[in-house]
């Protein structure tokens, strides 16, 4: 018997003796008991034995079932613009053709640390405008004339440099989502699109930062008006070329503006077994009416989630924002807990104060042409209630609440349990959280909370006296509990 197996058996014996009052392990297992006063052997040194006391009563009951497992979490992230992109601060320097407001190198590093080290974001989706191939290089999509391509700065190479700068801080997943194709491209000729995309993907590889993923287009059914059939053919042709050249980049589809627009495009691609083999994830945004962030659109999200489950693919929510931080965390809860989303990405990681609509986690400030620092917005801290604790590779498990105003999700994170609880009501709630069968052995609870007047407040740690804990959730709050050995 291994040490681990012995520890588990010992814990079962101790639990049986405490809860059922059994005099032997056999009696608890249903076997014929041999009456004996000999106590079971003590657990090995340093063995973890879950407390078996009775938890204090509370108005709301939450039960975590670690044996009922759902999706694996791929991580959290944002879309980004480069630090010297004029779009960042909405300024322009005629001499340099870049932004007139420059973020100093030291603060660029601080922003990267804030996103990828402190917030534990691991994903970056880069947005790029047309301009890589302003005019068609030639009429043969099988022959690429790279002298007709321009990869400089924000067209591509600047994003490579961003990735190389961000990776030491914790970035490990990046993918392109072109805002649009070149003006000369036809929406009925996927061959030319594939030639263009392959030139971009090869450039990333050759620059030492091969793309893990490539999104065919950002919102193809909205701004680009691309048909499901075009996307399906583009996936088949691009995937085949990547396979022949041994490039490991996988494809994300359809990355569209709304689940209702995304659904028929995802169905068209995944219904084709040749195209399906190249798809790594289904992605959608949440804009109702295209660009209205007041309420997330979920009309077709259940169908998109079912489609992902049917083909054993992760579902990603790759872009959305809201000026109300609490709507944002409620949306994150819904994505993760109701629709089995594996990755959640906010709109912008950082953007200038001119875009004061809550679409960025970090605001870059300036006075005229002078940089004046940056600030972490409430959405930054609220997102961290998930991203700082629910790490890539975590597995969501079932968590039920007796009160519809208390929204709860739970995750297995290594040898820990993470419980994220929202009180959406107008009054505080007393909550009893019980760890059901299959929970890892945990002995202590730590917690952090964000409300309208608190930001990532660290609460006093608690030593467990039973298989869970009882706590109070303030009105309009999100609290993250870590249960650790």
Image: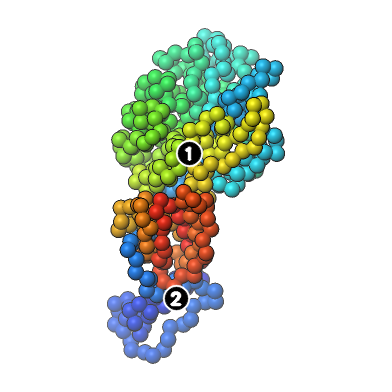
Horizontal side of residue 392 vs 105, given as left or right? left
Q: Could you tell me which secondary element the residue under label 1 belongs to? A: strand
Q: Which residue carries the number 1 mark?
A: 345
Q: Residue at x 43, y 20 (%)?
A: 224
Q: CA distance from mark 2 to mark 1?
A: 43 Å
Horizontal side of residue 292 vs 88, given as left or right? left
Visible in this render: residue 144?
no
Q: Residue at x 49, y 11 (%)?
A: 184
In the rendering, at what x and y percent does residue 228 appear?
A: 36, 23
Q: Residues within 10 Å of mark 2 (few under 14, many from 20)?
A: many
Q: State the residue in front, 470 or 34.
A: 470
In the rendering, at what x and y percent does residue 176 appear?
A: 52, 29
Q: Relative to 110, is 277 above or below?
A: above
Q: Residue at x 50, y 52 (%)?
A: 454
In the rendering, at what x and y percent does residue 170 appear?
A: 60, 44
Q: Residues within 10 Å of mark 1 (few under 14, many from 20)?
A: many
Q: Residue at x 29, y 77 (%)?
A: 30
> Residue 10: which numbered mark, if any?
2
> Residue 211: which numbered mark, if any?
none
């Amino acid at each position: 018997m291994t040490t681990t197996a012995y520890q588990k058996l010992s814990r079962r014996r101790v639990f049986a003796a405490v809860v059922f009052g059994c005099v032997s392990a056999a009696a608890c297992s249903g076997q014929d008991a041999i009456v004996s006063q000999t106590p079971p052997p003590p657990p090995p040194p340093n063995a973890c034995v879950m407390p078996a006391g009775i938890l204090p009563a509370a108005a709301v009951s939450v039960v975590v079932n670690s044996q009922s497992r759902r999706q694996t979490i791929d991580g959290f992230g944002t879309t980004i613009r480069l630090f010297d992109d004029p779009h960042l601060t909405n300024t322009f320097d005629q001499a340099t053709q870049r932004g007139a407001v420059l973020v100093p190198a030291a603060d660029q590093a601080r922003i990267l640390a804030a996103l990828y080290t402190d917030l534990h974001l691991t994903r970056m989706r880069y947005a790029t405008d047309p301009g890589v191939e302003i005019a068609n290089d030639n009429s043969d999509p099988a022959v690429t004339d790279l002298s007709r391509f321009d990869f400089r700065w924000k067209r591509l190479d600047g994003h490579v440099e961003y990735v190389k700068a961000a990776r030491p801080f914790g970035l490990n997943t990046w993918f392109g989502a072109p805002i649009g194709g070149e003006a000369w491209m036809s929406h009925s000729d996927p061959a030319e699109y594939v030639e263009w995309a392959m030139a971009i993907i090869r450039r990333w590889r050759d620059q030492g930062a091969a793309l893990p993923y490539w999104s065919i287009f950002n919102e193809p059914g909205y701004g680009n008006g691309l048909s499901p059939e075009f996307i399906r053919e583009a996936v088949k042709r691009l995937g085949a070329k990547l396979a022949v050249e041994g490039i490991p980049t996988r494809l994300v589809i359809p990355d569209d503006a709304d689940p209702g627009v995304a659904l028929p495009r995802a169905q068209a691609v995944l219904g084709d077994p040749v195209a399906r083999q190249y798809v790594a994830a289904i992605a959608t945004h949440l804009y109702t009416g295209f660009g209205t962030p007041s309420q997330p659109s979920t009309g077709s999200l259940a169908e998109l989630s079912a489609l992902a489950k049917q083909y054993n693919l992760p579902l990603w929510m790759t872009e959305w924002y809201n000026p109300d931080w609490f709507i944002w965390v409620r949306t994150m809860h819904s994505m993760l807990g109701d629709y089995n989303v594996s990755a959640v990405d906010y709109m912008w990681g950082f953007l200038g104060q001119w875009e004061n609509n809550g679409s960025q986690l970090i605001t870059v400030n300036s006075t005229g042409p002078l940089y004046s620092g940056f600030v972490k917005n409430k959405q930054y801290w609220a997102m961290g209630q998930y991203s700082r604790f629910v790490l890539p590779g975590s597995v969501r498990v079932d968590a039920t609440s007796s009160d519809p105003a208390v929204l709860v999700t739970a995750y297995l994170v290594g040898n820990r349990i993470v419980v994220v609880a929202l009180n959406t009501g107008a009054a505080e709630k007393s909550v009893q959280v019980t760890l059901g069968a299959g929970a890892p052995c945990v002995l202590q609870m730590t917690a952090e909370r964000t409300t309208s007047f608190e930001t990532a407040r660290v609460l006093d740690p608690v030593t467990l006296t039973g298989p869970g804990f009882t706590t109070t959730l303030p009105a309009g709050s999100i609290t993250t509990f870590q249960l650790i050995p």
